[in-house]
Image (tube, helix red, strand yellow):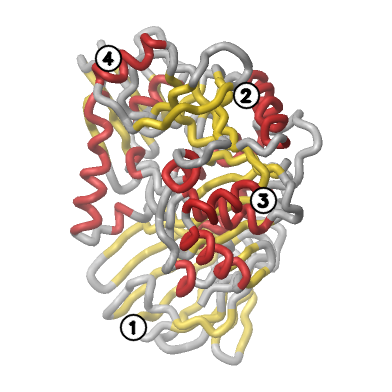
Amino acid sequence: MIPVILSGGSGTRLWPLSRSQYPKQFLPLVSEKTMLQETVNRLNGLTDLASPIVVCNENHRFMVAEQLREIDVTPSAIILEPIGRNTAPAVALAALAAKLPDDILLILPADHVIKNVTAFQNAVLIAEDLAKQNFLVTFGIVPTHAETGYGYIKSTQTTGEAFPVECFVEKPNLETATNYVESGDYFWNSGMFAFKASIYLQELEKFNPEMFAVCKNTFENAKTDVDFVRLSAEIFAKCPSDSIDYAVMEKTERAMVVPLDANWNDVGSWSALWEVGEKDESGNIIRGDVLTVDCTNSYIHSEKKLISVIGVEDLVIIETDDAVMIAPKNRVQDVKLIVDKLKKENRPEADLHQKVYRPWGNYDSVDNGERHKTKRIVVKPKAKLSLQMHHHRAEHWVVVKGTALVTKGDEQILLTENQSTFIPLGVAHRLENPGVIPLEIVEVQSGSYLGEDDIVRFSDNYGRE
């Protein structure tokens, strides 16, 4: 059985912590591990598992590789989507990447919380047996209340380890959801599946031949680059966008549902995160430097600043380096409206944090002006930035910690703590950490244009253009 981790989401409902270039699956929201790492670790103890396949946004490739490395997991493939086309094409690509037609794929979104791991693994074993019998298996969450934020699965029976699916239904209103839960015939749709690679592709070709053909053509023309499978954006752009449910599961006669009662949550909002977290005696979840007086049932997260809260209840308060978000818990689904506004105004807060992660380390914007910008840059041991130049800005580097090997034009300079160098506009340059501890520098940029797109790369270790 091959775990297939779907890590293409943008997590806009958890803004400002989750952003399109650093979404929720890469954040440690419920434990010290990120949600991607928790998803992979949840499989520990299951036998006969192959190395996972991860399908992710091309922009997230280095975060996926690094986070898997941190938990000593080597993926069999990291498939890079140049554009999002929903879950059905993503799973088709993973099925095409499977070595054998009868390999069973266990499809898992990277951003779910499952607290009862034993119950989850037991359900996986049941699903595996059904998949061997050529069924397409979905996991139906046993509902705990009338939820309007999930789709539902209706089964033809309600006793036993698994049963045929009668139908999938869209997110209902509250009255309909209440009737579903009271009937006992419905489960929440988890978005998790198990099936043979060949059976999924067979059913996809039957019900959506255009999607199947584009995915097959895309995969056949893919290029392998170190850990990554790179897809042609030109070919993949022709693929229809659809979920597994719409493309296959609602149409197939092979659908089975395995009930799962494992304290599951897809953490699709701040209120959902509050529900699954450990609360204090007042019902609050507190992260960071926070002081409260007469505050109840709230989620308060501080990254940098002291947050003081007096006399409130049922609020979500999130502070990051560059944004503060405050909302009643019953309005947190509308956070996406704020993100839509940010995107409409082309504001960077929709996509990037103040601290930006790169394959070689990270940088943190400290100060911005009309003609200057100051960054704190951290380079991992033995890592190096691309050899590059800028048309519109010069840079001054000061080493704060570690040792820097600087390429500047035709010369190389070794700098240690408290030493500095100046990179004139138009000069090819590269920063490298030859040491065994992280290199920290302060960079001061000056010029007429300071955007991140003013980079001409001559060579790069990470395959970036």
Left or right: 464 as drawn, with respect to 245: right
- Counting residues from the start of the chain, the first of labels 3 and 4 encountered is 3
Task: Say what secondary structure mark 4 lies in.
Answer: loop
- For label 2, count other residues whose C-alpha is less than 10 Å away and answer few (under 14), some (14-19) or many (20+): many
Q: How far is mark 3 from mark 2, CA to CA?
A: 25 Å
Badge 1 density bin: few <14, some 14–19, many ≥20, Cα 10 Å: some
| Residue 414 position by quadrant | bottom right
Along the polypeptide, which appears first: circle 4 or circle 2? 2
Sequence-earlier tag: 4 or 1 = 4
Give the residue at x 49% y 68%: 398
Q: Amino acid at mark 4?
A: Cys
Are the residues tagged 4 and 1 within 8 Å (C-beta)? no
Three-letter code for the amino acid on which mark 2 is drawn = Phe
Rounded to the nearest angstrom, the CA distance separating label 1 from label 2 is 55 Å
**Mark 4 or 2, closer to the camera:** 2
- The residue carrying mark 4 is 295
- In this view of the protein, which residue sits in the foreground, 233 or 399? 233
Q: CA distance from mark 4 to mark 1?
A: 50 Å
Pick whichever of labels 1 and 2 is earlier in the sequence. 2
State whether residue 285 is above or below residue 2. above
Q: Residue 56: x and y, percent? A: 53, 54
Circle 3: residue type: Ser
Instruction: Tell me if label 1 and label 2 are in contact, CB under 8 Å.
Output: no
Residue linked to disc 1:
392
Residue at the spot of label 2: 120
Query: In 3D space, how far apart are the residues under numbered discs 1 and 3 (Cα atoms)?
Result: 53 Å
Amino acid residing under circle 1: His
Which of label 1 and label 2 is nearer to you?
Answer: 2
Q: Which mark is residue 198?
A: 3
